[in-house]
Amino acid sequence: MEITSSLDKGTQPVAASSPLLVLDGLVSTLESLESAIAGLQALREYTLAMASRLAEVMNDGGGNDGGGPASGSAVPSVLNGARWDAAELAQRAVAAEIATATRANDRTVQRQMGQAVELLDRFPATFGALAHGRISLAHARMIQDAGAALDDPAALAGYEASVVPCAERQAPGRVRRLAVREAEKAQAAPMGTRHERAAGERRVWVTPLPDGMAELAAILPAAVAYGIHDRLTRMAQAHAEAGGNQTPETAGMHRSTDQLRADLLAELLLCGAPTGHDTPDGLLTAITARVDVTVPVLTLIDGETVRTAGNAAAGKTAPGHAAASSSTRVPAELNGQHPIDPATARILAGQATAWNRVLTDPINGAVLAVDRYRPGEDLKRLLTARDSRCRFPGCGIKARELDLDHTHDAALGGATETGNLAGLCRRHHMLKHHTRWTIRQTGAGVLEWTSPSGRKYTDSPPTPASYTAGTGKTPGSIPANAARQGGDTGPPPPF
């Protein structure tokens, strides 16, 4: 439908004379687009499933991905006590190839490959509806997730016959309730047995969020989860009704029920004692929280001190009332990857009994050296500071969980030095040793990965929080020896 303007001829455009016709056309166009998008998503699912099948072919009955170091061996690969079969390594190699080419995370791609295989093999009616554009990928995932526990093909077919027609008429949110109900009806095992098995998978995890925040989540039995939320709600309400004790941080500030629930949860978890699960000697109660914080020196120094020192170095007198702007402070980082506000960083650094100081290049931010007020493993600390996350492209596993890998194998003469070491998570450590993925160091900690198909990907060390040339702020705002005052051992924490 073509809409033109003819105001100069004294006529009205179609949009002005018949807006309902325009709306009808827009809705029809969007319907067609959604159907086409669903078809493309089905094609993507099919392609990912074929990639998984290809990994099985490359494995070729017990090697790795078709020509790596362990090709032809039926013995599982072993690294630091962990055993991995060749089929799993082949899947990882293919997922890594796809992920690096599409700028995605290889764990995510491997999970999507598994989902695609399951959709095609176990949910043919759902995949058919998706391919013909009658449902969206969101509908398909809802049906797939709710029916994942159904093993009997007949029960699964009956489940799809009940749910797919509903999905063709309803939004995904409404389909979920029916899908869960129909899947429950089709279950062969009793609820008690399944609940016991599911309760064995309870866990807690953290997801980073912007602005120095993070989400703490847990999978718990439903009664426990709702009970926790209800208790926090009643505690928050009682606190609000009683007026509550104001802390210096909350004085004069009204907190909502959501905020009170969050504060109460944090205090209970950080300060409470696990009386029901503690050891006889109270070992668990004695354990306190531990975090790693990377703090630029200028963030630790008070802003007024930085301004005064900088002016003094330039032969100027700083106004006594001038306050440094927030732009002169560089955010600190929690566990090498999560920005936190400067005030929290200074508090954590001041309370630390031992901590690492990371010296970075003021131009490019590269890690130059690491020292510590208590002796330790210097080389390991330097590499942990340089490689604050796994060095495979797209991987974000933090430094505390990495293996220090010799790029050129130590058994073959590789040196144990920064130019031949890199931090890799266990997954990508295995990938490097037992598939056709290869790696070499090109200098300054830069790694060049080569995929099984010959594509090359470069990974540079993560730049820690520091002043760089691009920020417009330079280390010249404080004396060059400001961080070394007090002798060779450096000033007492926190600077």
Image (cartoon, rainbow, N blue to C red):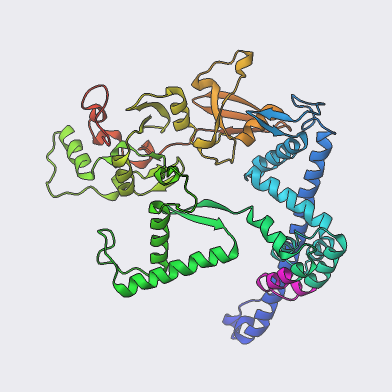
Q: Can residue 436 be seen from the camera position used here?
A: no
Q: Residue furthest front?
A: 280
Task: Specify whether 96 is left or right of 467.
Answer: right
The quarter in which the N terminus is drawn is bottom right
Residue 337: x and y, percent?
A: 46, 43
Q: Residue furthest right?
A: 154
Q: Quadrant of residue 75?
A: top right
Q: Is residue 271 above or below residue 236?
A: above
Start-end of magenta stretch? 165-181
Residue 336: x and y, percent?
A: 45, 40
Residue 180 part of the magenta-drawn span: yes
How many numbered discs, if any?
0
Residue 147 part of the magenta-drawn span: no
Q: Quadrant of residue 373?
A: top left
Q: Nearer the viewer, residue 166 or 263?
A: 263
Q: Nearer the viewer, residue 201 or 481?
A: 201
Q: Can residue 287 be seen from the camera position used here?
A: yes
Which residue is located at x 40 percent, y 43 percent? 286
Which residue is located at x 60 percent, y 17 percent? 410
The quarter in which the C terminus is drawn is top left
Residue 480: x and y, percent?
A: 25, 28
Q: Nearer the viewer, residue 154 or 305?
A: 154
Q: Is residue 153 above or below residue 450?
A: below
Residue 192: x and y, percent?
A: 70, 63
Classified by dominant secondary structure, the portion drawn in magenta counts as helix
Which residue is located at x 59 percent, y 84 percent? 16
